[in-house]
Structure formats: C-alpha cells, structure tokens
Image (cartoon, grey):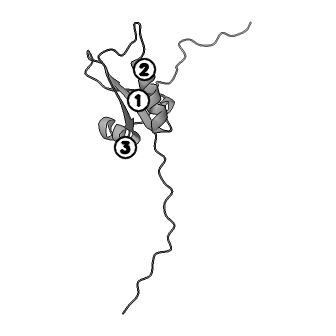
Amino acid sequence: MSRTTRSNKPLPPPVPNEYFVMVQRNYETIKRVVSAHPTREEAIAERDKRRAYTGSFNYDNAELSVITLAEAKRIFGEDWEFGATAKSKTAKPKTKTSAPKQKT
C-alpha cells in the first residue's frame, strides 16, 4: 500500500469579512451601502437604529439589509470598495485657475 504525503504549504490567512448595511428606498431604483462594520451584530444594530430614524431622512418603507463583502461585490461588481478609498479613485485632481501673484 502506498502512502500519500500532505503538502507542507501553509494555509492562506482567513479573509476578514466586513458587513454592510444596504438600503433601497421605495422611491429609488438604486441600492446604496450606508455603513460598514467588522461584525454582523454591529451591522444588525446599525440597521435597527436606522430603521428607527424619524424626520426628513427616515427609512420608512425602505428595504434595509445586512450584506457581506462577497455579496456586495456580487451586487456592485468585483472592483467595488466602500468608503474613502473608493471616493479617492474617482476624485478629480485640483487645478489652479490663475497664476500665482508675484510680489513687487
């Protein structure tokens, strides 16, 4: 009987998962991610807090859900990122509109 040996390759580190609160208001056709959290429990607490909002920016008749990073990438595309990193990729560089003044 022959024996097979196990590979001594180290296992890849586990992929950290993030959880997001996603909202789709009844008058909108788009879904948007409004917050990110390290644990599902924190995301659920944020979802419940937002559901209780009152006033002009409430979530009445809105679909609020908690999704994982994998689900978000499936919905929004593989290159989707949440937060400031995603915003900085689309930001336009600032340009000067006039020449600097010279001292006389």
Q: Amino acid at mark 2?
A: Arg
> What is the crowding at mark 1: few (fewer than 14 residues within 10 Å), some, or many (at least 20)?
many
Please tell me the numbered disc located at residue 63: none
In the displayed structure, 15 sits above or below 61; it is: below
**Which image quarter holds the N terminus?**
bottom left
Left or right of 65: which side holds 39? right
Q: Is residue 38 left or right of residue 22?
A: right
Badge 2 vs badge 1, beta-carbon distance below 8 Å: yes
Relative to 1, say whether 26 is above or below. above
In which quadrant of the rendered view does residue 73 lie? top left
Residue 79, by quadrant, is top left
Image coordinates for residue 6, horizontal then vertical, percent: 45, 77
Instruction: Kindly tell me whether residue 86 is visible in this rendering.
Output: no
- Mark 2 and mark 3 lie on one chain; the one further toward the N terminus is 2
- Callout in the foreground (2, 1): 2
- The reply to whether dot 2 and dot 3 touch (C-beta < 8 Å) is no
Q: Identify which residue, 41 or 59, lies in the foreground.
A: 41
Which label sits in the foreground, 2 or 3?
2
Q: Report how far apart the C-alphas of labels 2 and 1 lie in the structure.
A: 9 Å
Q: Which residue is mark 1?
A: 21
Q: Which residue is mark 2?
A: 50
Name the residue: 38% across, 13% down. Answer: 58
Specify which label sits upstream in the sequence, 2 or 1.
1
C-alpha span from label 1 to label 3: 13 Å
Q: Quadrant of the C terminus?
A: top right
